[in-house]
Image (tube, helix red, strand yellow):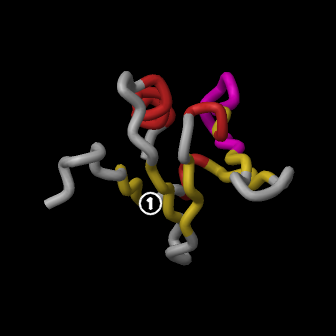
Amino acid sequence: MSADELKRLLQARPFKSFKVFLPSDRAFEVPHPEFAWLTPNGRTLVVGEATSDGFDILDVPLIVRVQVSPAPGKEG
């Protein structure tokens, strides 16, 4: 996963929620672009938790895959 790919997902209009996965298969959900921030050098992704004031700091090179949610009404 590259920083450019994450930027495209965060800036997509209309936005589609997505999850990022680490090698351990732990997932971090980004339900809205305001829940994630990519550092200027693109090495770190900060993901806010939707149910608390917590956040996770992820090393972008360790993100192994992204799962984009289907658009409403497009589930297959």
Which of the two residues, 73 or 46, is positioned nearer the viewer here? Answer: 73
Residue farthest along the left direction in this orientation: 76
From the viewer's perspective, tell me whether residue 40 is left or right of residue 31: right
Q: Is residue 53 magenta?
A: no
From the top left corner, tell me how far across and down residue 65 is, in percent: 40, 58
Q: Residue at x 55, y 66 (%)?
A: 27
Question: Total label count?
Answer: 1
Vertical relation: 10 (above or below) 51: above
How many other residues sit within 10 Å of disc 1, few (<14), some (14-19) or many (≥20)? some
Residue farthest along the bottom direction in this orientation: 24
Residue farthest along the front direction in this orientation: 73
From the top left corner, tell me how far across and down residue 8 is, in percent: 41, 28
Which of the two residues, 73 or 3, is positioned nearer the viewer here? Answer: 73
Amino acid marked by disc 1: Val
From the viewer's perspective, tell me whether residue 70 is left or right of residue 8: left
Screen quadrant of the C terminus: bottom left
Q: Secondary structure at mark 1?
A: loop
From the top left corner, tell me how far across and down residue 28 is, in percent: 59, 59
Which of the two residues, 61 or 53, is positioned nearer the viewer here? Answer: 53
From the viewer's perspective, tell me whether residue 7 is left or right of residue 50: left
Q: Residue at x 67, y 23 (%)?
A: 40
From the top left corner, tell me how far across and down residue 37 is, in percent: 67, 33
Vertical relation: 31 (above or below) 14: below
Residue farthest along the right direction in this orientation: 53
Q: What segment carries the magenta color?
A: 38-46
Q: Give the residue at mark 1.
A: 64
Picture quadrant where residue 75 is located = bottom left
Q: Residue at x 46, y 23 (%)?
A: 11
